[in-house]
Image (spheres, rainbow, N blue to C red):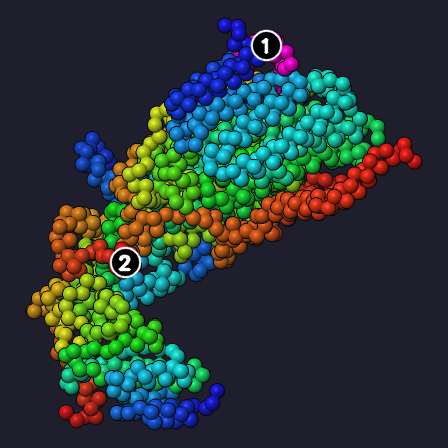
Amino acid sequence: MDIFTNVEFIILLTLGFGVIAYLVGRYNKTAGAFATIIGTAITFLAVAYYGLNGELDFTADLFPAFSYGFSNLGIFFAVIVSFIFLMVSFFNPYFVGKYKYPALYSMLFMFSLAGAMGVFFTNDFLDMFFFFEFVVWTSLFLIPLGGSKKAATMYYGFSAAGSFALLFAIFMIQKETGRFNMETAFAHVFTTKQSVVIFFLFMFSGFAKLGAFPLHIWLPKVLGKAPDPISAVFSGGLEKLGAFVAIIGIIRFMPMAITDTAGLFAYLNATAFLSNGMTLLQLIIGLLGAMTIVFGTLMAIRQDDAKKLLAYSSMSNGGYILVAIVLMDSITFSGGLYHIVAHALASTAAFLAIGAVSRQTGTTKMSELGGHIHEMPITYMVYLIAIISMAGIPPMGGFISKWLIFQGVIDKGLIVIGAATFFGSIGSFLYVFRPLAALFLGQQLPQFKDKVKEAPILMLIPLLVLSALNIVTGIFPIQSMRFLNINAVLNELGLQSLVFNGWTIAGHNGGLQATLIAGMFGIGVVIAFVLFMLLKKSKQVGLMDTYTAGNFIYTEELLHYSVDFYAPLERLYEKYINIMKNFYKSLANKVKEFGRVTKYFFFTNKPEITVFWIIVVIAFLLWGDIV
Amino acid sequence: MTNTINNVEFVRNLVEDNYKVNKTEVIDQYQVSFEVEKEEVHRLLAQLRSEGWIQMSYLSAIDWIADNEFELVYIVFNWEKPVYIQVRTRLDRDNPVMESIMPIHPGCKYYEREAHEYFGIEFPGNPDFHKPLILEDWDDMPPLRKDFDPRAYSDAHFSSREYPETHENTLGQESKVAQRESRMARVFKVGKGGKK
Amino acid sequence: MESTKFSPITKLSKEEVDRKWWEIGDFFRRNSLWMLMYCTGCCAIELPPAMTSAYDMERLGMGPMATPRQADVLLVTGYLSLKTLRRVIYTYEQMSEPKYIVGFGSCTINGGIYHDSHVVINQLDQYIPVDTYVAGCMPNTEAVMNGFIDLMSLIKNKKADGWKRYKENYEWYKKNQIDSLGEVQVHDEYHQ
Amino acid sequence: MMVGILTGFGVALFGFVWQTSLGGISRKVVARLQKRYGPKWYQEFLDIFKLLSKRATSHGWIFDLGVIMALGGIIATAAFMPVTNDIFAFADFDNFFIYVYLIAVGMLGMAMSASGSGNPLASIGVMRALTTMLAYEVPFMVIVMVIIKHAGTSSLRGIAMAQQDAGMWYMVALPLGFIVAFICLLGMLGKKPFETYIAPAELASGPMVEYGGKQLGMLFIMHEITVFIEVSLFVHLFLGGAENIFVFLLKYFVVYSVANLVSNVNGRFKIDQVVVFFYKWILPLAMIQAFVALYMNGWWN
């Protein structure tokens, strides 16, 4: 079966499945959704099996205009994103009935996967831009299915800005190197002025797609308002496109050595700006990443809607990935890559768990939900394992990547960025715990007394697979790193590979034996369980029989603590949350204002003014010749 | 702050000129009490309120079982001229009905509910005067009426500890009862100055 | 108060072993009595002097606890009106076994000075099983400390089985409670 | 490996026994402060075993699972803790981040089961515990970042050996850092100034409100071992570890008693005062100390 090894065939196959899903979807909604499951399964298996063994062939014979090239980084991202799409597609049959255009939903779902595969595999910048735009357009129409047009427009606004910045950079590269091919661009040495501009444009598009600090406004609105599977796909998969572009920008185009021009540009990338050899550019991106972490955490702590909360958490984790990449240190970079894997698995599992709850209750607002652990224990355990990984607690994958990132931050001695990462990791514990306590635990609310049941089997499969992977990436990090051959990616990008001696990963200041920690944790739990079983059995008591200082309480919802969970903490920074939103609003007003001024001057209904302006323009154009 | 002497004068003139006062009594320089007919209470309280007696401190009821009458006491207070005015009125005991003064002093709602619960006085105009306020599941007659016997209620509802009549000494000491009685007798004698 | 001598455990039968475990458990239970001070009436004022430096009940291992779940001893200090008794019964049932009750003052013994009131009950042990009483209309602090020592020796001699009695003749207690209180779990205007 | 695991759990048991008896002694010290005798020195043992002997009430499977997970996590953390230079479970896997994050497992287990009990007081207590954790954790980790950068290794034994070889404890080398870390230690131990989450008067002992019997006993064991981990962490980081067991016990006793005495003369902060206090005073101090230590080391010598 060699056709499956051809990348172009895989992408065409995905597009084909999209069309099939549409046609079948018109006939019967859930059948169309099942088509997406099959489609994503085939794509993932092909990409993962052949990609990881390195047997993918990149010849493009059907459409010669597109050209593909082998890159470990591309395969790494393709495997993760297609896996996330596969996991989320299991939810489609249950959610597709809720939306206005179910067939279109399935088709666009497959198309955005095809576009993402295209971005990762191509080795031509223009093709990358085309696939980039293809992903933006397909996912653009998926968002309003969740009911909010404003989110779609905001998403398009920021993505368009990102894409055009990328386009501008591509044309600058083409002007310099004459071709759009990536390898030649990477090999070419640009002047510092050009490389700084190209780097800035790449980072701009990376920030826009990743939802990092200055361009993060769209992320919570889109992920909060989009349909549940789509926000899971966004946070797990499509956001990683931004990370991909950011990696290319930082690794390939970050000017490290001073070449020629003096002045501002020389100062910008003076090598030893800090005593640890980081350039000023690296520091700026690192600080932006740190601000993303801090603002993402602070905003996530005060959200009432679980989906918005998880959206801000993926923004904060995007900040982690940025900080990990920009330090240009092999251990931290591998930490960043591993964080991409861990975050993708954990946040997709969390989004899908919240989606499973909101499918039956209709809302994800924590102030209206409560006590769902009693009807949905498996979903609860999945969400628990996901947040353990998101908070970076040992037995799960999140701990490994955060440990690696801390190695670099400490080794480089960055105080502010270090404080921000510590704040982010402790803060992530706070906000991931809020849905756990407000949504799953606590009192059972009477309005959902008998409406909520455990999620059906088909929905449980992806949830259980994701939590199993969360555990595996946490307990056997070395094996999972070898499976995703992260070392090959590191070497391809010019960094030394990670050192595994035996079962430990060697960091800058110490080894990490994750299997031992998980083993000891397991033994500790066994000891506690034995102690618990030896003692007297305790009397089972209902939820309503709690200590209420002697009062007789008959209304459960009064006893559920979920509204304004961190009220004392939120009050401290309540006044400063809308700074960026107001900044963009004022920006929008200025543009409107400018539009009104030009309209006032140029588009009047008096013909003589327009004639006058025509003369002025002609005069301006022919200025050289007339005078 | 005018001095308090003429406050009481001021109050007495104010009330006695315009209302038929059955009995007035100046308790001390800060307290004056007027007994008025049932119908005039509303007008009097309204006027006092406009004069500055805005705080309704308390509404209490007294059960004169001998005269077969209840007596309601409205205590109002003025923060500028610090004088407590007690407006008293008499109600028939068998059919105790008094129009509620919530329109004048809304705060009096709970005092009226308490008066109803403990004395059985109705206050039409108070939306829920019949609801229990303090006593839970009370099934007997209003307990603070003079004809209610709490001891009988207690014996009926709560078992009490029976003590054996004879108190024989189990520890074998001779009884000190005689000494105790003689000592008490001496104390009373001294108290009454030696007279029997 | 002589401590228990642990006789050498030969091949013991099941209930023998249980009894031995229970004896060891009693040793721990009597040396660390956590009390839930349900300060119903005026005798509550006797507890601070028992805690502070003059008498220092912490020497006996006793300390105040906030909730019935954690407490072992329920100190009913003072007269019990009907409303308070309902809350005391509800709190008593929330405590974890084995639990003990100490009744302070004459109001819990025979109604004290409120014996003829229509709201105060006269005998506490009709409604909940009381292990020890501390007599006195506001008992002296020494009496309070002696009451605690009595409770500890009762536990040692396995006589402090109020909670067992409550469980065995539960209906009798419930009937008494219903007769006097009407019903324990009441609805009021604000908690429909 | 097996020997390592056994010594690990041996260390955890030793930590529990040592800290519980030390807790009893410190209760006696506090009693002496108030001119009274105070309980027996083994009172904490009596309390814990009394709790384990009682029949408690449980609010469902999550209520018990949380307690088991908390105690298991904390036992695993204590297993990694090196006691002296030669008594330790695992040679070089005791780096600093294991403790910070494995204690988070204990906190998560307790928080999960507390809010699973359905009592709003427990959820509010958990919220306050997490907010306090956010407050005291960041300055502490900034200071420890400086220590790791300076000592070159993040393993506790390595840091302790570095201090012993250099003959200079970080208490002396980083004076400001020492003060910041001590205040954060008070926060970690839940001692009086930052005891808002167990406030008996307001929250009826916060997260512990629904626990009784064996669950509360297990949580007491977890609390004792957590205190052991945090104080021995402080000893290794700032007081140069220990050559032999007696030096370790002495340093441990001094640090714990000072923390206890400081906490006994303090009132209790409101929860937002805690956060404001840490972020207005303690974090800037930690930042200054870090900046001075890392970038101006040639400045004073």
Measuring 28% from the left and 92% from the top, which residue is drawn there?
B20
Measuring 48% from the left and 30% from the top, which residue is drawn there?
A230
Return the x and y of residue B99 as percentages of the image width and height. 25, 77
Q: Is residue A420 above or below residue A517?
A: below
Compared across the picture, whether D112 is left or right of A570 comes to left
Chain under disc 2: C
Q: Nearer the viewer, residue A451 or D126?
A: A451
Measuring 62% from the left and 32% from the top, which residue is drawn there?
A160
Mark 1 → mark 2, Cα distance in angstroms: 88 Å
Count neighbours of disc 1 (C-alpha within 10 A) and say few if under 14, some if 14 to 19, many if 20 or more.
Answer: few
Given the image, on which type of amino acid does mark 2 rest?
Leu
Tell us which disc is closer to us: 1 or 2.
1
Compared across the picture, whether A619 is left or right of A335 comes to right
Q: Nearer the viewer, residue A348 or A522?
A: A348
Q: Nearer the viewer, residue D261 or D216?
A: D216
Given the image, on which type of amino acid does mark 1 rest?
Leu
Measuring 25% from the left and 39% from the top, which residue is drawn there?
C21
Whether residue D56 is visible, yes or no, is no
On the image, numbered disc 1 is attached to which residue? Answer: A62
Return the x and y of residue A340 as percentages of the image width and height. 55, 27
Q: Which residues are magenta?
A: A50-74
On the image, numbered disc 2 is attached to which residue? Answer: C75
| Quadrant position of the C terminus of chain A in the picture | top right
Compared across the picture, whether A615 is left or right of D262 comes to right
The quarter of the picture where residue C120 lies is bottom left
The quarter of the picture where residue A152 lies is top right
